[in-house]
Amino acid sequence: MYALMALTFVFGYLCIALEHPLKIDKAASAILTAVICWTLLVFGADSILPLIDSAAASSAGGHGISQELRHHLGEISEILFFLMGAMTIVELIDAHEGFKVITDRIRTNKRVHLLWLVGVITFFLSAALDNLATTIVMISLLRKLIDDQKERWFYAGIVIIAANAGGAWSPIGDVTTTMLWIGNQVTASGIVVKLIIPSMVCLLVPLLIMSFILKGEITPPKQKQSLESRRDPTTPFERNLVFVLGLGALIFVPVFKTITGLPPYMGILFGLGVLWVTTEIIHRSKNSEDKDPLSVVGVLRRIDVPSVLFFLGILLAVSSLSTAGHLIDVATYLKDSLGNVYTIAMSIGLLSAVVDNVPMVAGAMKMYPLVSPAALAAASADDLPWLSNFVVDGHFWEMLAYSAGTGGSCLIIGSAAGVAAMGMERINFIWYVKYISGLAFAGYISGALTYIAMFAM
């Protein structure tokens, strides 16, 4: 059963990676993989668990496995509730066209100036929202500024790099960083202070290279004349109010966690509750046709539920391997073969360009348990240098957050931001490899080396 669980996970992983050729949604593959892995674990509990933990062996069987499942599901639900709350807030801002507060202020025809504006705005907006939502907003903006599609692709490539780099240094900017934050591997202040400069370098290197390539001015798209002026769904006051409250709710989450000690999903639900009440009040006098798309109830229909189910499935599948002991074996192998936490983290980051970064980080979190101060104090002199990398805000967790967040930019299918841009602009995979992958890799390596130079040495 031990080997069969591993084969099932690998097969499910391949189905997730080959989602587009197979035309099977990755959420379906992830859920099936999770259920089958846990089922195999139940049937093989008597033979698997005694090899791992004598305490687990005493409760082997369906009841003991169910207890393990409930434990893992409790940890996973914190991530899912946080993501659902954050996604709802972002969709609510978008429904009110709140992002026009930023996008309407970009007015330049010079290619290099636009390149830097788009890159910098995407970088910081992604840290406040998330890389996927920011990519969608910025690609929509580029369509209003650049007429030639192939030229837009270059800027879309920078958007992907900037969105992933911006999400890496913020606890709410990328789902993998959020996972590490909720799991207490990193703190909000620690991840911001330690990773903002390496993440900036990850973006600045591609921007500098592109600045020598792009010259002249862009050709803006021709404005289509309409006989009827389009009626805005909201007033400027409503738009600005929802934008400020929504952005404030997202930024307030780390503060809420620090003040109260409650999990981050409680902070995001508090912000969602405030926005919900506010939008109900400001739209209470409108008819149902105008009010429904601007309400939280209406926005919930636009939430990407398949993505939430994908996270549920893949995290459950990884937790089954953790319970069975597979990840301990993988962690030991990586330590013996690579022997360096920075090399391990950077390898995981590059692998996330080929396969999804969520299971990569979830696996790493299970492979290398968080080391407590007491365990560190009791460690031997030989083990101390290695174990010190796995404490809260340890070098491995910070490097993992950076690598998993930015490594996916090396291929367009390696991140949610890349997949979104690919779908919106029909960017060719080979074109991206030819013109953008090298820039993304140069930025990735430069940022990693910056972190090592700043802290590891």
Image: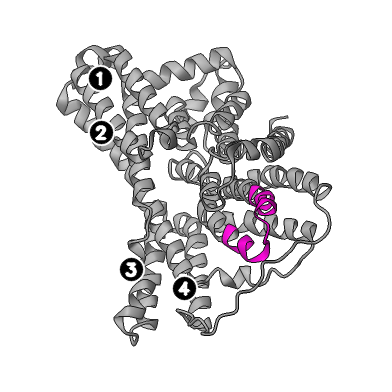
Q: Label for residue 69? A: 2
Look at the image and say whether residue 146 sits in the magenta stretch: yes
Gap in Å between the C-alphas at discs 2 and 4? 40 Å
What residue does disc 1 label?
55
Residue 39 position within the rendered picture, expressed as x and y whole percent measured from the top left: 21, 25
Q: Label for residue 96? A: 4
Given contact means CB atoms under 8 Å apart, are the residues at marks 4 and 1 in contact? no
Q: Quadrant of residue 50?
A: top left
User: Image height check: is 269 above or below 226?
Assistant: above
Q: Nearer the viewer, residue 24 or 279?
A: 24
Dot placed on the residue nearer the N-terminal end, 4 or 1: 1
Dot placed on the residue nearer the N-terminal end, 1 or 2: 1
User: Image height check: is 243 above or below 36?
Assistant: below
Dot placed on the residue nearer the N-terminal end, 2 or 4: 2
Q: Amino acid at mark 4?
A: His
Q: Nearer the viewer, residue 380 or 227?
A: 227
Residue 431 position within the rendered picture, expressed as x and y whole percent measured from the top left: 65, 39
Look at the image and say whether residue 336 sits in the magenta stretch: no
Q: Please, what secondary structure does the residue beneath circle 1 have? A: helix
What residue does disc 3 label?
298
Q: Which residues are magenta?
A: 139-158
Gap in Å between the C-alphas at discs 1 and 2? 16 Å
Which dot, 2 or 3, sits closer to the camera? Answer: 3
Dot placed on the residue nearer the N-terminal end, 3 or 1: 1
Given contact means CB atoms under 8 Å apart, are the residues at marks 2 and 3 in contact? no
